Image (cartoon, rainbow, N blue to C red):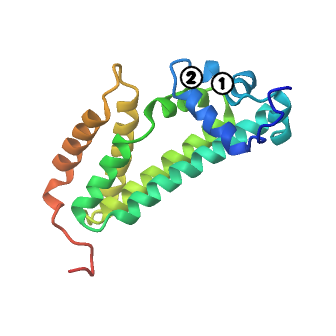
Amino acid sequence: MNRTQGAKRKCPEEFFVSALQVLDEPGGIRDLTIATLCHRLTVTKGSFYHHFAGWDDFVKGLMDYWEAQQIERTSAQLNEAQTAALHLGSIVELASNAPHRTENAIRAWAITHEVVAQTQARIDARRVAYAEVLLSYLVDDLPFVKRLATMSVALFIGLQHMEPRPDPEQIKDIMNGYLHEVVGPALDKKRPGTS
C-alpha cells in the first residue's frame, strides 16, 4: 500500500499551512520544496500536482493564502478597537503577535521572487493604511498621521530583523513606548462626532 492509499487526499490549504510551518523554522525558504511538503504531509508528489500546475502556481496560491491571513488579522484588530487607547493597543498587539520568523523568511524570499515581493508590498501598504485609520482617531493632522503610520510599520519591520530578535513582550514594550511618546498627548481625544 502506498502512502496515499487509505488516507484522505490533502487539500491545498494543508500544503499552505505546511509551507508556512517550514518557513517558520530555521531553514526557512531553503527547506521549502515540493519534496519537503509531500514528506511532511505523507503524500506523493502526485498529490501536489493534483492541486497545483507547478511550483509557480503553488507560490501564487501560498501568497494569496498568506495575504488573506494578514487581512483577517488586521480586520479583526480594527473591529475590536473602540476607544483611542484601544486603537493604540491594537497596533501594538498586531505587531507583537505577528509570525515574525515566517514573515522574515517571506521578506527574504521577496528579494528573488516577484510574486512574493508584490504580495509583501500589498500587505505592508495595508498595514500602513490600517495604522492610519487607528491613528486618525487620535490625531487631526492628516500628514502627521500618514508619517506616523509609516514610521510605526517601519519600526515593526525593523524589530523583526534585529538579532537577537526581541520576543513578543519586548516588541510590545518598544512599540508601546514609541507610540505613547509620540501620540501620548492625544490619547484621550475622541473621534469627531463621538462623546
| Residue 28 image label | 2
- Report the front residue among 6 and 189: 6
Q: Is residue 38 above or below residue 57?
A: above
Q: Is residue 25 above or below residue 171?
A: above
* Residue drawn at point x = 38 percent, y = 62 percent: 133
Residue, disc 1: 32
For this view, does 10 lie left or right of residue 99?
right
**Residue 16, quarter of picture:** top right
Q: Quadrant of the N terminus?
A: top right
- Report the front residue among 191 and 172: 172
Contact (Cβ within 8 Å) of mark 2 with mark 1 = yes
Q: Amino acid at mark 2?
A: Gly
| Residue 159 image label | none
Q: Position of residue 170 (x, y in %)?
A: 25, 33
Q: Position of residue 177 (x, y in %)?
A: 19, 42
- Report the front residue among 137 and 103: 103
* Residue drawn at point x = 15 percent, y = 65 percent: 188
* Residue drawn at point x = 62 percent, y = 42 percent: 118
Q: Position of residue 180 (x, y in %)?
A: 18, 49
- Report the front residue among 4 and 190: 4
Q: Quadrant of the C terminus?
A: bottom left
For this view, does 43 lie left or right of residue 95?
right
Q: Amino acid at mark 1?
A: Leu
Secondary structure of the residue carrying numbered label 1: loop
Give the total number of marks visible in the rendering: 2
**Residue 10, quarter of picture:** top right
For this view, does 93 lie left or right of residue 104?
left
Q: Is residue 129 above or below residue 155?
A: below
Q: Is residue 118 above or below residue 146?
A: above
Secondary structure of the residue carrying numbered label 2: helix
* Residue drawn at point x = 36 percent, y = 51 percent: 149
